[in-house]
Image: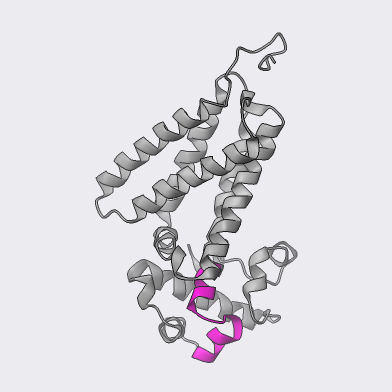
Amino acid sequence: MDSKDHLVPGTPANDAAPRQTRLRDKPQQRRARQRLDAILTAAEALVEEMEAEAITTNLIADRAGVPVSSVYRYFKNVSAVFAYLFEDLNEEIIAVIEDALAKSQPGWDDWREVTGSIITRLHGFLVDNPSYWKLLLVMQSSQQLRDAKAAMIDQVAGMLSDRWAQGMDGFSGGDPKLVGRFTVEIFMSIETRCAQMRDPSGVDEMFVELVKALEAYLSLYLNKVPPGPDGRPAD
């Protein structure tokens, strides 16, 4: 992710983002926003280059070319920086999912195409953003990171459950909220395992199994019965 891609407070769209609450101080001036962006860019680069547990506020400040006091101006500690980065990347993930759902035209077998598209695009995003995988590995190291992950799972699961509660994709036979949560949990657990793997071919094989696992699970609830005259699954 380039520095210009980091979303920092200062515009109406960004001000609505929940991650802004993690900032100890909100940058008002352009120079302050640029400094915060430099801090985030430095932190992300360090996450990609070294073990996250070894990153300190001093390292982030040195890489960003700012005093360490500037880091503490906006973040309580390194975990707070990581949580902000994680939520920053999550916004891109949500955009990928929303785009895939918006382009879908739910029908009899379309759910496999829709979910396949989402899974493939999300996996590609994670491969292209190795810092996300690295952050997944340190999720249990602090409450801030666990909270950020839980919020992301809730948001994505909510998007799926809202869709299925309307009967889209022929959903039936279960609680859409529970199925939505399990779907996201399965995806995240496999992606976390991928993050632990060093062999790229192993990651590809794991991804293939992820698709199989999700399709097998979702087939229990989606399009279980033939469609009625209106093209929707019959009761």
Where does the C terminus fall, quadrant-wise?
top right
In the image, residue 5 lies in the stretch drawn in magenta: no
Left or right: where does residue 103 sit relative to residue 48? right
The colour scheme is: one colour
Q: How many marks?
A: 0
The image shows residue 113 at horizontal and vertical percentages of 51, 28
Vertical placement of 161 versus 3: above or below?
above
Q: Which residues are magenta?
A: 68-83
Image x and y of residue 10, in percent? 70, 72
Depth order, front residue of 154/75: 154
The answer to whether residue 112 is left or right of residue 46 is: right
Residue 91 visible to an observer of this rendering: no
Q: Residue 21, image x and y in percent?
A: 67, 72
The residue at 53%/84% (across/down) is 71
Look at the picture and state if 220 lies above or below 78: above
On the rendered structure, is 107 left or right of 198? right
The reply to whether residue 228 is in sight is yes
Most extreme residue toward the right, as rendered? 12
- Counting from the top left corner in percent of width and height, residue 9 is at 67, 71
Q: In the rendered structure, does residue 72 fall within the stretch colored magenta? A: yes
> Who is closer to the viewer here, 16 or 164?
164
Task: Tell me which secondary structure the magenta stretch mostly adopts.
Answer: helix
Say which residue appears at 59% left-offset and 18% top-offset: 108
Tell me where residue 24 sits by quadrant.
bottom right
**Residue displayed at 40% across by 46% down:** 190
